[in-house]
Image (cartoon, rainbow, N blue to C red):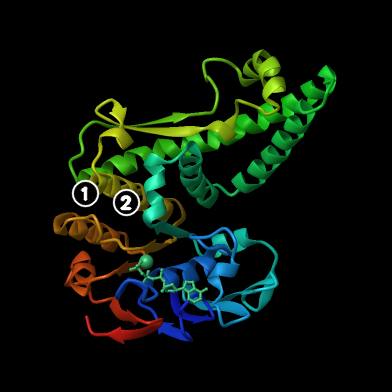
Amino acid sequence: MYLKKLDVHGLRNLKGIQLLLSPGANLFYGQNGSGKTSLLEAIHLLGRGRSFRTRTLNPVINQQEDSCTVFGLLEKEGVNFPMGVSRSRQGDFLFKVNGETINNASTLAEMMPLLVLDSESFHLLDGGPKYRRQYVDWGVFHVEHQYRGVWQSFRRALKQRNSLLRRDRIDDAEMSVWDLEFVELAERINGFREAYLKELIPKIQWVMSELSNIEGLEFKHYAGWDKTKPLAEVLASDRQRDMLAKVTGHGPHRADLSVRSNKQSANDVLSRGQTKILVTAMQIAQGFLFHERTGNQCLYLLDDLPSELDLQHREKVGELLCRLGAQTFITGVFLEDVVSTWPKEETQTNMFHVEHGGITPTEC
Ligand SMILES: Nc1ncnc2c1ncn2[C@@H]1O[C@H](COP(=O)(O)OP(=O)(O)OP(=O)(O)O)[C@@H](O)[C@H]1O
Ligand SMILES: [Mg+2]
């Protein structure tokens, strides 16, 4: 699966972009502020219906325009799927796949699974548990088709339980009914996550062994409650505390994945470059597992990949991504740094120069 063509109009500083893309590597280089991240943002908008930089989309629309549009032609097993997303300044949103309007962004995500590496990716180690939950859930969502439905039901049960906790008087019988459902869904979510991590963690370890020699790396999943006790018991003993806090303190919405190096928090001991290698490995591992489990490929958006990585690590990252065979978009400021990331003998490589919002194909 890969994006064959991309047209972008009215997005940030990009000027009427039309690109023919390689199924392998697509390398973009250009000065600061030229439009490289904006190009990746355009692909992200097409694949997820939102930006990876801002919560609201108005800043993404070019200041002189009323709307932005991204059109892509996706090839999947020899069949072409046109996809389009447009967003107006007034907030109107339109997603189209194969000529049909679709109503939710998760259909886009299923069509075109994206893995992103950018400056925000450091939050996988230095940010709160929500970043690691999002990371794990990306994988579970893409390999386990029941997951989305179970997760949505769980969100409803959690919302209901929290709204009961906010009442002045709580009806025990009513709460018990919600707790039953909450526990059942929580166990299922945790089961999906544990099964996924059982495969993912050895994959991360394998990718890390190919990339670098950070010693004593350990990953441990925390379900969101003490697993030595049944969740129903935990909820019951937490009841008073939850009533005071007016939120449910334990459950899969509080899960985390601890990442340690030689028994210490990886975030406390790894250098900036080592952190980048580790978060890159975590993304690459997901791509390999996704390919193994589904036979499909995801697309990689790697913003400023060369920065913070020395030549040896850049080459190893490029070599692994090349071995995976996924379509890859790599940006960087300097031509030499971007070129040296990708194996020279690899022929399926397109190179582009980004300058003042224009993008020109160049020779590798
Ligand atoms: N809504 C907008 N309309 C017009 N231009 C915008 C808008 N939002 C941002 N820009 C401009 O778009 C340009 C491209 O930004 P972008 O982040 O894509 O650059 P970049 O090539 O990734 O740079 P860097 O190497 O610094 O990361 C910037 O000069 C920015 O000021
Ligand atoms: Mg940038």
Q: Is residue 96 above or below residue 20?
A: above
Q: Is residue 75 left or right of residue 261?
A: right
The kind of residue on which mark 1 rests is Leu
Asked whether the viewer can see residue 286, the reply is no
Q: Residue furthest front?
A: 63
Q: Are marks 1 and 2 in contact (CB under 8 Å)?
A: yes
What residue do we see at 67% from left, 24% from top? 245
Residue 341, image x, y percentages = 22, 65
Q: Is residue 45 above or below residue 71?
A: above
Label tally: 2
Tell me the element at label 1: helix
Q: Is residue 270 left or right of residue 137?
A: left
What residue do we see at 70% from left, 65% from top? 103
Rendered-image quarter of ligand 2: bottom left
What residue do we see at 39% from left, 62% from top? 300
Q: Quadrant of the N terminus?
A: bottom left
Tell me where residue 301 sits by quadrant: bottom left
- Residue 211's tag is 1
Tell me the element at label 2: helix
The kind of residue on which mark 2 rests is Thr
User: Depth check: 98 or 217 in front?
Assistant: 217
Asked whether the viewer can see residue 324, the reply is yes
Check disc 2 and report the residue beneath it. Answer: 280
Q: Quadrant of the C terminus?
A: bottom left
Residue 352, image x, y percentages = 31, 80
The CA distance from mark 1 to mark 2 is 10 Å
Residue 290, image x, y percentages = 43, 52
Q: Residue furthest left?
A: 312
Q: Is residue 145 above or below residue 104?
A: above
Q: Is residue 352 left or right of residue 163?
A: left
